[in-house]
Structures are given as C-alpha cells and as structure tokens.
Image (cartoon, rainbow, N blue to C red):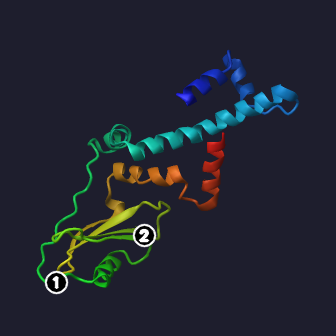
Amino acid sequence: SILATGVYLWLPRTWKRVKAAFAFNPRLKGRAFKVNVHKLVGICGMALVAMLAFTGAAIGFTWVKNVFIFGPCDGVAFVAPVPPKSIGVGGPISLEQAWSVARSLIPNFHTAKIFLPLEKNDSIAIAVVADDTANPEAHSQVYIDANDGKTLSFEPFAQASAGWRLNSWMKPLHKGTFGGLPSQLLIMAGTLC
C-alpha cells in the first residue's frame, strides 16, 4: 500500500507532465530541489522495493506461491516434495559413499547440502548446485538409499517445472545472493529509497 500511495501522490495531475516528473532538474534550489530528488529516487526505487516485497511474500506465504508462481506456470498448487524411503538392506553407508554417488551424477558443482536421515528408513538427500548456473538456489536433488548406497531418485534442476525454476529465484532476488557485490549494493540502495 505504501508503493501505491506513493505513486498516487507522485503522479502529476496531467499526463503531459509525466515526462517532466521523470527528469532531474539541477536548476531547482532549496526545498524544490529536495522534492525533485525525492520524487525521482522514489519512483525509480519503487520497482526494486516492489520486487523485494513480492519475493518476501513468496518466500513466506505458500498462497502467494500458488497464486502468482505455481498456478500460472504449472497449473497446480505448490506441494512440498516427499523424499523416498530407504529400501535396501545392509548397514548404513558412509557419507563418503553417498557423496561419491552424488558426484557421479553432478561432477561439477559449487555448492552442496547434505541432509542426513532422521529416522531409520529415511534416505540421504543431497542438494547440489551445478557450476553452470547463475542461480544459487538451482538445486538438483539426489536421494540415496542410506543402507546400500543406490540412487533412489535424481531430480536435475534443468528438468524441474517452470514453477519450481521461477520459485528458485525468490531467495536470490530477495537477498541479493546472485551477481555478487553489484546486486547486493543495488538491493541496499533500493531499500534506502
């Protein structure tokens, strides 16, 4: 609502003055100069603030994901994946064995997360981000049987639905974790607007 009221208050009374409202006028002095700078920075920063608000809502609320991401992209509601259960026999495998299975499927990576089994028949889940992606949340999932080391499921990110791929960008866009320091400075500047 702050964005909407800000635009309403900023919007010139006639459409002919909209072009002038987007222009920086260095000839103004005093309060008029400050108002000109405030309006220009505010309207330019509005898109970034709107993006931060939307991505925050998508991260925090499942209904936002369903209405704006998964519904339009996939035609279905968001459903959290259910990891497969370990079905093999034998003793538990070592983390090195599980890791070698994941590395055989995705040899070139820059980030990986290993989720250990919490219960007896849970599988080992490894989320791997390949080297060839700009998205730090583009996880390919590997589920490995904790008893015999066989691959139960491999879900490459490239084969994920459009909704999953779009949803994976919400955290990097919100936190500025893609693009290095320039994107983080842009996010910081947008929040200062």
Disc 2, disc 1: CB below 8 Å?
Answer: no
Answer left or right for 174 relative to 72: right
Mark 1: amino acid? Gly
For the C terminus, the image quarter is top right
Mark 2: amino acid? Ala
Quadrant of residue 27 in the image? top right
Q: Position of residue 135 (x, y in %)?
A: 47, 60
Q: Position of residue 5 (x, y in %)?
A: 58, 24
Residue at the spot 21% in from the left edge and 80% down from the top edge:
149
Residue at the spot 32% in from the left edge and 84% down from the top edge:
96
Q: Which element type, helix, strand or loop, lies under badge 2? A: strand
Answer left or right for 98 relative to 113: left
Q: Position of residue 31 (x, y in %)?
A: 82, 26
Count residues near mark 2 (Cα–Cα under 10 Å), then give few for <14, some for 14-19, many for 20+: many
Q: Is there any visible trace of residue 192 in the rendered image?
A: yes
Q: Which element type, helix, strand or loop, lies under badge 1? A: loop
Q: Is there any visible trace of residue 28 in the rendered image?
A: no
Above/below status of 81 relative to 71: below
Q: Nearer the viewer, mark 2 or mark 1?
A: 1
Which mark, residue 91?
A: 1
How far is mark 2 from mark 1, CA to CA? 30 Å
Q: Which residue is mark 2?
A: 130
Answer left or right for 128 relative to 101: right
Which mark, residue 152?
A: none
Residue at the spot 29% in from the left edge and 46% down from the top edge:
78
